[in-house]
Image: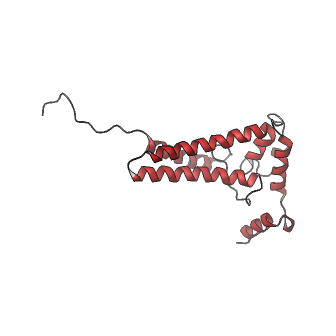
Amino acid sequence: MPHVTSRIDRFLNPDKGDTFQVDTATQAFANGGLLGAGPGGGEAKRILPDAHTDFTFAVVGEEFGFVACVTLLLLFAFIVMRLLGRAKHESDPFPALAVSGLAVVFGLQAIINMGVNVSLLPAKGMTLPFISYGGSSLLGMAIAMGLALALSRKRPAASPLRGLPA
């Protein structure tokens, strides 16, 4: 698959090819600074081809700054840790493993997207869960989180019916 090889080569050696998107995303973070340029004040969303999907985190960094990026990162970490905590307290192994797996998928997708935006990982084309534009991504993640919520909810123990003749 030559396009995958090209992405990895460009990541390992930026001089080998076009790194426009990653360079623009990195510059967007630098332009945003601590508090950002303000809503609508960023330039990256106008020049990045995939600003609404793959590089949403860079747009957030430019318009709302480092504080918003850290807040977003902490929000994703909180959701993952909360799901893993709920899975830890499950007595049945199926819901525990299923919720853990869904939490890991959610967290890894967020980490991969953020890692690409800050040039720590090669470009993948992966969206930021619940933030990036994309119908199938949003629908898939909504179903995954719905399953995680359903599997981790408190279920009342079965109790015998009272007041009925035996």
**Coordinates of residue 7 in the picture (x, y in percent):** 76, 65
Left or right of residue 152: residue 57? right
The answer to which of 138 and 24 lies nearer the viewer is 24
- The residue that appears at 43% across and 49% down in the rendered structure is 95
- The residue that appears at 81% across and 50% down in the rendered structure is 25
**Coordinates of residue 99 in the picture (x, y in percent):** 48, 49
- The residue that appears at 13% across and 30% down in the rendered structure is 165
Left or right of residue 130: residue 42? right
Q: Quadrant of residue 14?
A: bottom right
Q: How is the image coloured?
A: secondary structure
The N terminus: image quadrant: bottom right
Which residue is at the far left?
Answer: 166
Q: Quadrant of residue 46?
A: top right
Which residue is at the far top?
Answer: 163
The C terminus: image quadrant: top left
Left or right of residue 159: residue 129? right
- The residue that appears at 85% across and 49% down in the rendered structure is 27
**Coordinates of residue 8 in the picture (x, y in percent):** 75, 66
Which residue is at the far bottom?
Answer: 1
**Number of numbered tags placed on the structure image:** 0
**Coordinates of residue 150 in the picture (x, y in percent):** 45, 43
